[in-house]
Amino acid sequence: MTLDRLTELAAQSDGILYVMAVLLLIALTVIIDRFWYLGRTVRRGKRVTRIVAQFAHLDRKTLADLVEKSPRLPHRALLEVPLQHPELKDPHRLSELLEEAILWQAPKLDSRLWMLDTIVTLAPLLGLLGTIAGMVKAFAVLGDAGNAATQITGGVGEALIATACGLLIAIVGLVCFNSLNNWTRLIVHQLETLKISMVNRLDAPRVALGEKRSHGPAIHPVANTGT
């Protein structure tokens, strides 16, 4: 099918195929943007999470180095929390602040995915609307006795092109939407893992010190010096 033929069909669809072309353009824009951002975030975030997990204890110098190596990552917001609250000693309070940072970052991860979700639902409906409008025009020629049956069947076939276009947009959008949702879930899981790792490693020296104090000094048995 040539471009001229597609243009003719779009003109006969009362503008519905033009609207679907705009939806396809928006969907491809969102898909490319989110695949680039989320894919890069998953790879770099996995590296940051593994680096933190390798340490037995995190100090502020190590956190500062990790912050510098994590530009434009949602993980950076969590790494900055202990640096922004150097006086913080309570691990429960630290966990709450890290959870707050995750909640602030979560909306940025699925940004504009609602547009893709809407297009996946809307495109087949628009295709069905275009098909119904085309079939109404095709069967309108029945009132003219001079029209051949091939004109009717040809009009119905052209009307079904709108449904095919809508389904094609929905299929591509649905596959990409599910993939992007899975990447978003992986990033949130990375943030939760990073939160737990930071709480455990930033609190490690205090836990060790508390255990030492609770046990008290070691008591050695006195040697028997009796004669």
Image (cartoon, helix red, strand yellow):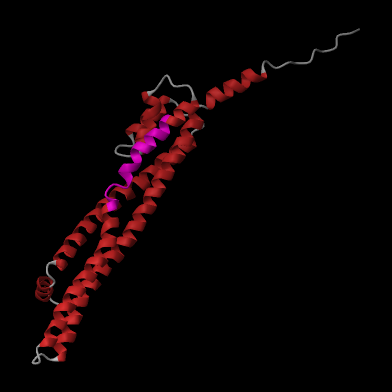
- As drawn, 81 above or below 103: above
Q: Is residue 187 magenta?
A: no
Prevailing secondary structure class for the magenta stretch in the rendered image? helix
Residue at image coords 32%, 39% = 73
Q: Position of residue 98 (x, y in %)?
A: 41, 32
Looking at the image, which residue sits at the far top? 227
- As drawn, 105 above or below 19: above
Q: Quadrant of residue 22?
A: bottom left
Q: Is residue 106 magenta?
A: yes
Depth check, front residue: 78 or 222:
78
Depth check, front residue: 169 or 89:
169
Residue at image coords 24%, 68% = 166
Q: Quadrant of the N terminus?
A: bottom left
Q: For this view, does 7 lie left or right of residue 180? A: left
- As drawn, 59 above or below 11: above
- As drawn, 147 above or below 46: below
Q: Position of residue 157 (x, y in %)?
A: 20, 81
Q: Position of residue 46 (x, y in %)?
A: 41, 44
Q: Quadrant of the C terminus?
A: top right
Q: For this view, does 126 lie left or right of residue 106? A: left
Looking at the image, which residue sits at the far front? 143
Q: Which segment is the magenta one?
A: 97-114
Depth check, front residue: 215 or 189:
189
Q: For this view, does 94 lie left or right of residue 208? A: left
Q: Position of residue 176 (x, y in %)?
A: 32, 59
Residue at image coords 38%, 28% = 81
